[in-house]
Amino acid sequence: MRQGAAQQRRRRERQGLGLGLGRSVTDAARLGLLAGLTVGIVLGLGACSPFGGSGSTGLANAAGTVIDAPQGSASADLVAGPEQNEVTTLVPVISEGGDEVYRDTSAYSTRHGVAITWQSYGEALWVVSSDVGTFKVARAGAGWEKSASTALPPEVRDRLGR
């Protein structure tokens, strides 16, 4: 005997955990497991980046993560740069009191990775790119000056996990 439409709908809602999904509890559990695994993999890959994590460690390797200089006078951020050969890029920016005071002239590929971190002494921001190279951006008079570098201070090397 056929069930009425209302009975079928109620049955599907019960099976879909009351969400009107029309899926069984087993299907809902599989979807939850898949979503959990996906989030875990994404977070795991971020933690396994060649440049470590970001945020509380004083390291930024993604757009939108602002890190404060230890001296507290400046902050640094990676902002979206121009797309190059269909690859997203990031550009380091230094701000003081909410005003941009330095913008790197180079755009760093997200495909190869870039990270920025402050040195604990002096006012120096380190820009490390596996594609373009390593640079130190330091206060020079009333502005900021970028210079190429081959040697990272031990604290910066440790923060980057190198």
Image (spheres, rainbow, N blue to C red):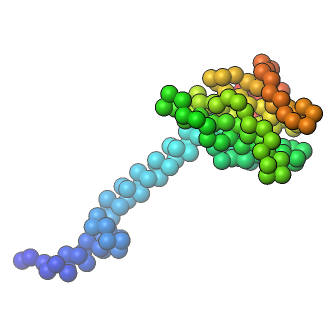
Q: Residue at x 31, y 67 (%)?
A: 21
**Horizontal and vertical percent for residue 44?**
56, 42
| In the displayed structure image, the side of residue 19 where residue 146 appears, left or right | right
Q: Residue furthest top?
A: 150
Quadrant of the image containing the N terminus: bottom left
76 on left or right of 31 = right
Does 135 appear above or below 80? above
Q: Nearer the viewer, residue 114 or 101?
A: 101
Residue at 47% from the left image edge and 52% from the top image edge: 36
> Residue at coordinates 78% horizontally, 31% vertically from top-left?
126
25 with respect to 102 (left or right): left
In the rendered image, the vertical position of residue 7 relative to residue 71, given as above or below: below
Residue 5 in the image: state x and y as whole percent.
Answer: 16, 78
Q: Quadrant of the C terminus?
A: top right
- Residue placed at 27% from the left, 67% from the top? 22
In this view of the protein, which residue sits in the foreground, 44 or 147? 147
Q: Is residue 120 visible?
A: yes
Furthest residue to the left?
Answer: 1
Q: How many marks?
A: 0
Residue 102 % position (x, y): 78, 38
Query: Closest to the observer: 140 or 119?
Result: 140
- Residue 68 appearing in the image: no
What percent of the width, then of the height, locates residue 112?
58, 28
